[in-house]
Image: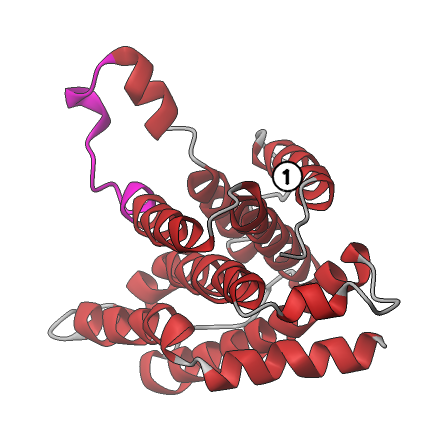
Amino acid sequence: MMLGMMKYHLLMLIREPANVFFGLALPFLMMFIMASGQEDVSIIMNFAFPVYITIAILALAITDSALTHAHSRQIKFLHRLKMTPVSPATYLLSSILTRLIVLAVFVATFLGFNVIFFHVSLAERNWVAIAVALVLTFAMLYFIGMFLANFLKNTRTTQSVLHITFWALLLLMNGFFHGEVLPNALRVFVENTPTLYALELLEAAWLNTGLFEGHAFMVVVGITVVFGTLSIAFFKYE
């Protein structure tokens, strides 16, 4: 049953490649643009790597997983699924595992490009910490997207909200809005968006500065638990 659901999620990703293509292609585009005409490219890419991975995770979690779920509701697939033994937990877990496999392939490919073209060193990396950070950041953003995909009854509205969420989190992560020109209350919100904590966690794992240093780890875990619980509680088959 689990394998069957994973096959379904993979087929949905393949059939709707536009949903995730931009998010997975953007890091490669940014990588080569940033590298053009620069000296010490390996140093630049080393520090930029967590940013590119966060963008890919955001695309898989929001514009792929959550939008696919909203589409499945719209075409009544989930209504038919309700008549089967597949539980919401099985559906969500199979979706997460499928995207984590895709994420692993992306990360390996992206690392390969960095090593071959920009001579980024893979020595002295804590791969366990990197794997933990990748899984946690994906789970957090996945459950945020899945909660939004289930919270609203109207699927068309849901799709619009998900697109807005993707771009908002992407722009906020890249410092599009400058905190010093914002009112205090809004600045606090901007400086505590989930993607910034995801980026901080991935940076700590990638640069091996201590996964548990600071409070990013606990914040990401907390957000994951909250939105994971809400995703199951608000899960809609139709």
Q: Residue placed farthest to the left in the image?
A: 37
Q: x, y percentage for residue 171? A: 27, 46
- Quarter residue 39 falls in: bottom left
Q: Which residue is mark 1?
A: 227
At x 57%, y 62%, the residue is 73
Give the position of the C terminus as an image quadrant: bottom right
- Quarter residue 100 falls in: bottom right
At x 15%, y 69%, the residue is 38
Give the position of the N terminus as an image quadrant: bottom right
At x 51%, y 42%, the residue is 152
> In this picture, is 214 found above or below 32?
above
Callout 1: helix, strand or loop?
Answer: helix
Nearest to the observer: residue 8 or residue 54: 8
**Callout 1: few (<14), some (14-19), or many (20+) C-alpha neighbours within 10 Å?**
many
Q: Which residues are magenta?
A: 171-183
At x 44%, y 50%, the residue is 158
Nearest to the observer: residue 38 or residue 96: 96
Q: Residue placed farthest to the top in the image?
A: 184
Amino acid type for the residue under numbered disc 1: Phe
